[in-house]
Amino acid sequence: MSESGILQILTYPDDVLKTKSETIENIDDDLQDLIDCMGKTMYAAPGIGLAANQVGETKRVLVYDINPMENDHELSVLINPEITHAEGEIIHEEACLSVIDFSAEVTRYSQIQVHGLDRHGNPLDIEAEGLLAVCLQHEIDHLNGLLFIDHISGLKRSLYKKRINKLLKKGTSSP
């Protein structure tokens, strides 16, 4: 970890991004430090959400703020989140800090209910719609080892993977 607390964000095709995160049993100081660093990393990127496996930790925790450009940051934390109810449909243009230089329209549920814990271990139930619902589904997917590109057509995904593999063979780190 750097002195600034900003962590390195892993990018596709790193295997950790395909790994299902482990349930958190103990909310300790190390987890609090990770949460703080994830928040700093997300805001610095900038992004609206970040899951632990995106920074190399296979722990079931995510942070988000769907209004990151506001001066008073409101970092939200979800530990062991699970979608308990979902309905409707929304198509939203998505991008990802771990999927470099690519965005695509993804079909998601338009309304969801999520159960988890806050950073202090208190039960938390969230009813979300619109951008918040999209963000939470995107980040929970990360915790389940899925990327948003797993939700797009096989052709678009294949073209993206070929482009990234070509760049990796050249030794270039970004598209």
Image (spheres, rainbow, N blue to C red):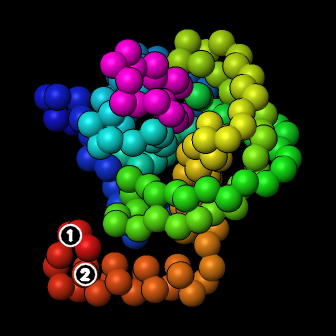
Any mark on residue 112, and which?
none
The residue under the point 76% across, 46% down is 110
Location of residue 50 (image quadrant):
top left
Location of residue 118 (image quadrant):
top right
Tell whether position 107 is magenta: no
Magenta range: 61-77
2 or 1: tag closer to the N-terminus: 2
In the figure, 147 relative to 154: above or below?
above
Q: Position of residue 26 (x, y in %)?
A: 55, 22
Quarter of the image for the C terminus: give it: bottom left
What residue did someone put label 2 on? Answer: 167
> Could you say whether the residue bearing mark 1 is in a helix, strand or loop?
loop
Quarter of the image for the N terminus: give it: top left
In the figure, 150 relative to 165: above or below?
above
Mark 2: amino acid: Leu
Residue 159 in sight in this render: yes
**Are there few (<14), some (14-19), or many (20+) residues within 10 Å of tag 1?**
few
Lateral position of residue 57 relative to residue 122, left or right: left
Tell whether position 64 is magenta: yes
The residue under the point 39% across, 42% down is 47
Marks 2 and 1 in Cβ contact (< 8 Å): yes
The residue under the point 34% across, 64% down is 100
Q: Position of residue 134 (x, y in %)?
A: 63, 46
Q: Position of residue 116 (x, y in %)?
A: 68, 27
Any mark on residue 173, and which?
1
